[in-house]
Image: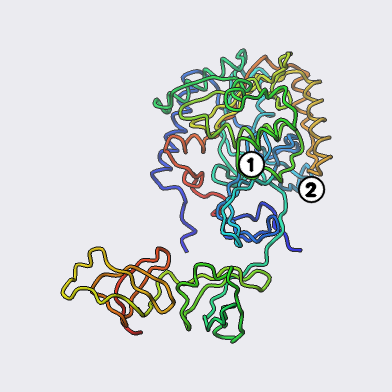
């Protein structure tokens, strides 16, 4: 079992805590001049996404988490699993619903995703900050209105619904910020 | 890569140089003698909370080689000067502590340490205050509070009487930083965590002197009989950051020897290195040193407070990562 001592703590280090893989966000060394040294750590549970604080006595050791981030290409979903492929080894990996989470709204086949593997299995699927998707349905809107004030809902090829300006029409490609779920601009075919 | 560059700006280094010059001016005006004691010594601190770095000397005087410990504070040697009738003395030097690196720690840092024969810890606190105000006139407001009153004020707890279990329960109640899994070796470690995690963030702006520590945290301070017995020790917090630690000094040789031996027993239990205790200091105390108080003040942290910086790397030209 690989372990880390508190001296190895730094942002990004992956640890096992309470049976879950976690990633250190911030590590602070705290020590009174004549007293006990501590490491006060902000840490993200990679399975739940929750951020917690934890204090360790300096010198303690903690089990390492076998966590790896890889860039994989999204292939398709069979409804139960989402299938990805390593672009060089062609190795295929399938992620379940809890790993895909909110990213499901933006997953388009062929797109590259960052997949976090724990003991070889995907636990987090992250889509790029910006994705380009086709509008499959939106109201035609009023001709000549280019102000976009208020906008209208548009359904995208992945099923996600975003607000778009009135002048954007069904069949067009748009760029969306996946962090906020907001329309950014019209896009051209790549 | 730019890792050859200093971390502190040249402007910061000018501020640092001016600070050191001002400190020397303060002590010159008060006729306190500047001294210089060895960085490397055959002896080191036995304090279980402080680890020494060591080097090896081989040559005349030690043909087979001998370990030398880098001082963690110049305290022992300065007390030997006091025993030799030096009168009031100060020193500005680099000191070294293994394992300490972080936002407010660098393993090599600059300490100002001074001793005042005839002062008790209250008189020395006054002089620390005068020094700080001479360097940073806007450092106030100034408060003085006992360790006990501080714990009662913020945690409704008596630090002299509470058991380990009560201290642990208090920590769990007052902070969310994940103490549930923490196992600490003793009562003092629980007091330390309450101090660092629960109280320090609430100390607030200005100069706060905390004094009369639990007897179990006396280090090299004399203990005033109680109840409760307290260590005549103080710490200065600037804006909630610990910058200085002072003692009404223990001058009793036998008690000092006993504390060293107690430290070494504790070190043996926790499998820490056994550092040779300083027999020169014991001999000096046996010879007799004047009733005195002494204080060590972290120059890097003082400079951080003066310049409003939050990371010690901003005030040191070449901190650990670039040393």
For the view shown, which residue lies furthest in the front direction? A139
What chain does mark 2 sit on? B
Answer left or right for B153 relative to A159. Answer: right
Q: Residue at x 49, y 18 (%)?
A: B30
Question: What is the crowding at mark 2: few (fewer than 14 residues within 10 Å), some, or many (at least 20)?
Answer: few
Element under label 1? strand
- Residue B165's label in the rendered image is none
Tell me the crowding category of disc 1: few under 14, some 14 to 19, or many 20 or more residues within 10 angstroms, Cα based.
Answer: many
Report how many numbered discs are placed on residues in the image.
2
Determine which quarter of the picture holds residue B254. top right
Q: Is residue B156 above or below residue B37?
A: above
Compared with B210, A182 (above or below) is: below
Tag 2 or tag 1, which sits nearer the N-term?
2
The disc label shown at residue B96, or none: 1
Location of residue B322 in the rendering, given as x and y in whole percent from the top left corner:
54, 54
Residue at the image position 72 percent from the left and 30 percent from the top: B166
Percent of width and height locating residue B285: 75, 20
* Residue A83 occupies quadrant: bottom right
Residues beneath discs 1 and 2 located on the same chain: yes
Q: Position of residue B13 (x, y in %)?
A: 43, 43
Residue A190 appears left or right of B17: left
Please name the residue shown 69% across and 57% down the image: A4
Q: Nearer the viewer, residue B308 or A109?
A: A109
At x 53%, y 84%, the residue is A75
Q: CA distance from mark 1 to mark 2?
A: 21 Å
Please name which of the two marks, 1 or 2, marks the residue nearer to the observer. 1
* Numbered mark located on residue B65 in the image: 2
Q: Nearer the viewer, residue B69 or A69?
A: A69
Element type where label 2 sits in the image:
strand
Relative depth, front residue between B206 and A170: A170
């Amino acid at each position: 079992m690989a372990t880390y001592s508190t001296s190895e703590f730094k942002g990004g280090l992956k640890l096992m805590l309470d049976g879950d893989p976690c990633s250190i966000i911030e590590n602070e060394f705290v020590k009174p001049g004549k007293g006990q040294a501590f490491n006060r750590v902000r840490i993200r549970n990679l399975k739940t996404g929750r951020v917690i604080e934890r204090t360790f006595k300096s010198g303690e050791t903690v089990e390492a988490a076998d966590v790896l981030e890889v860039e994989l290409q999204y292939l398709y979903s069979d409804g139960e699993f989402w299938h990805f492929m390593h672009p060089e080894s062609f190795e295929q990996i399938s992620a379940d619903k809890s790993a895909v989470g909110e990213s499901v709204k933006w997953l388009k086949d062929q797109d590259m995703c960052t997949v976090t593997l724990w003991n070889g299995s995907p636990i987090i699927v992250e889509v790029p900050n910006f994705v380009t998707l086709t509008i499959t349905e939106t109201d035609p809107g009023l001709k000549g209105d280019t102000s976009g004030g208020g906008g209208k809902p548009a359904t995208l090829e992945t099923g996600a619904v975003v607000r778009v300006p009135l002048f954007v029409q069904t069949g067009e490609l748009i760029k969306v910020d996946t962090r906020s779920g907001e329309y950014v601009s019209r896009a051209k075919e790549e | 890569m730019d890792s050859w560059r200093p971390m502190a700006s040249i402007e910061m280094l000018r501020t640092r140089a001016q600070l050191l010059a001002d400190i020397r001016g303060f002590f010159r005006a008060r006729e306190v003698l500047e001294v210089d004691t060895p960085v490397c010594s055959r002896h080191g601190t036995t304090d279980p909370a402080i680890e020494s770095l060591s080097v090896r000397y081989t040559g005349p005087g030690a043909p087979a080689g001998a370990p030398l410990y880098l001082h963690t504070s110049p305290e022992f040697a300065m007390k030997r000067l006091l025993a030799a009738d030096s009168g009031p003395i100060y020193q500005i030097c680099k000191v070294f502590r293994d394992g300490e690196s972080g936002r407010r720690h660098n393993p090599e840092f600059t300490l100002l340490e001074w001793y005042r024969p005839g002062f008790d810890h209250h008189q020395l606190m006054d002089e620390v205050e005068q020094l700080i105000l001479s360097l940073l006139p806007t450092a106030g407001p100034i408060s003085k509070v006992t360790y006990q009153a501080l714990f009662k004020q913020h945690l409704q707890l008596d630090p002299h009487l509470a058991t380990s279990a009560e201290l642990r329960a208090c920590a769990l109640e007052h902070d969310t930083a994940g103490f549930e899994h923490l196992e600490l070796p003793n009562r003092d470690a629980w007091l330390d965590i309450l101090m660092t995690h629960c109280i320090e963030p609430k100390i607030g702006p200005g100069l706060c002197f905390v004094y009369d520590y639990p007897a179990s945290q006396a280090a090299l301070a004399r203990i005033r009989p109680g109840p409760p017995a307290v260590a005549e020790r103080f710490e200065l917090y600037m804006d909630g950051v610990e910058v200085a630690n002072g003692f009404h000094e223990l001058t009793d040789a036998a008690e000092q020897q006993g504390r060293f031996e107690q430290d070494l027993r504790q070190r043996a239990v926790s499998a820490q290195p056994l550092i040779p205790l300083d027999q020169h200091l014991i001999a000096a105390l046996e010879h007799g040193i004047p009733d005195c108080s002494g204080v060590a003040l972290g120059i890097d942290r003082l400079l951080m407070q003066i310049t409003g910086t939050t990371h010690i790397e901003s005030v040191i030209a070449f901190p650990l990562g670039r040393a």
